[in-house]
Every structure is written in structure tokens, then in C-alpha cells.
Image (spheres, rainbow, N blue to C red):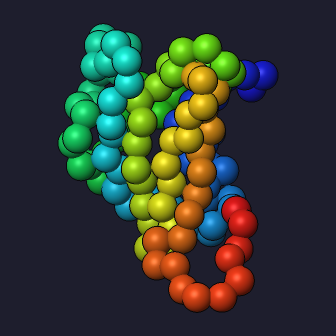
């Protein structure tokens, strides 16, 4: 989306890359949040992934450099964990193994 994304798009990529759907998510914080821009979620609240309101999944946020425009999160499936990576406001999803094992590390 040219420097823009939604959680729905991000997690569709997660499913495509891992073959798994997240089961739960916990939202963190961001500067200036919580505010009215992210109604329906609270920092630190653990919720079932399928209970995330559509208004949260479909809210467009910027992914380019500047100010982080979405809350941080941890989300997980049976074998994978997704976290929001942020550097100088540029945001993207990072996927890591939930149960790492010794040996070659698969990059997702």
C-alpha cells in the first residue's frame, strides 16, 4: 500500500508465510496511545485473535519513517510469533519461531 498498511494485510502475510493463523495477540503501547484512533483495544490486554474488532484490523497506518502510527504487539500461532519492528517510525512485522531449536535458522 505504498507506505501504508493494515493489521489485516500484515496478518494475511503472516498466514501466507507460516501457513498458520495467530491464536492470540497482546497490544503494547506507542507514543500518544491509547487514544481514540485505536478504539476496542487496550495496552497489555490479551485477546483471542479472532476477537480483534474489524475497525482495528482495517485501520490504515503509515509504515514509513517518521512517527510510529500503530500500537506494538505480540501475536502468536502454534509455531510462530509475530512482533512489530519499529525503527525511526518505519514499521514492519517480524516473524520468529515460537519454539526455536538448534540448527539452521529459517528466515521468514
Q: In this image, 98 relative to 94: left or right?
A: left
Q: In this image, 49 relative to 10: left or right?
A: left
In the image, 8 versus 96, the foreground residue is 96
Residue 27 to residue 5: above or below:
below
Q: Quadrant of residue 78?
A: bottom left
Q: In this image, 105 relative to 46: left or right?
A: right
Give the x, y percent position of residue 18: 63, 67
* Residue 48 showing in the rendered view: yes
Q: Quadrant of residue 90?
A: top right
Residue 68 to residue 41: above or below:
above
> Which residue is pictured at 25% across the width and 34% down the height?
43
Give the x, y percent position of residue 79: 49, 74
> Which residue is pictured at 30% across the width and 53% down the height?
48
In the image, 55 versus 69, the foreground residue is 69
- Total number of numbered discs in the rendering: 0
Residue 32 to residue 56: above or below:
above
Give the x, y percent position of residue 24: 34, 56
- Quadrant location of the C terminus? bottom right
Q: Quadrant of residue 15?
A: bottom right
Residue 48 to residue 80: above or below:
above
- Quadrant location of the N terminus? top right
> Which residue is pictured at 54% across the width and 86% down the height?
101
Give the x, y percent position of residue 27: 33, 39
* Residue 49 showing in the rendered view: no
From this viewpoint, which residue is outermost toward the bottom? 102
> Which residue is pictured at 70% across the width and 74% down the height?
106
Amino acid at each position: 500500500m505504498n507506505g501504508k498498511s493494515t493489521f489485516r494485510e500484515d496478518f494475511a502475510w503472516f498466514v501466507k508465510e507460516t501457513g498458520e493463523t495467530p491464536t492470540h495477540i497482546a497490544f503494547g503501547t506507542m507514543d500518544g496511545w491509547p487514544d481514540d484512533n485505536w478504539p476496542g483495544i487496550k495496552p497489555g490486554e490479551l485477546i483471542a485473535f479472532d476477537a480483534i474488532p474489524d475497525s482495528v484490523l482495517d485501520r490504515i497506518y503509515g509504515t514509513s519513517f517518521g512517527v510510529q502510527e500503530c500500537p506494538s504487539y505480540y501475536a502468536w500461532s502454534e509455531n510462530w510469533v509475530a512482533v512489530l519492528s519499529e525503527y525511526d517510525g518505519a514499521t514492519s512485522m517480524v516473524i520468529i519461531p515460537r519454539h526455536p531449536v538448534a540448527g539452521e535458522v529459517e528466515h521468514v
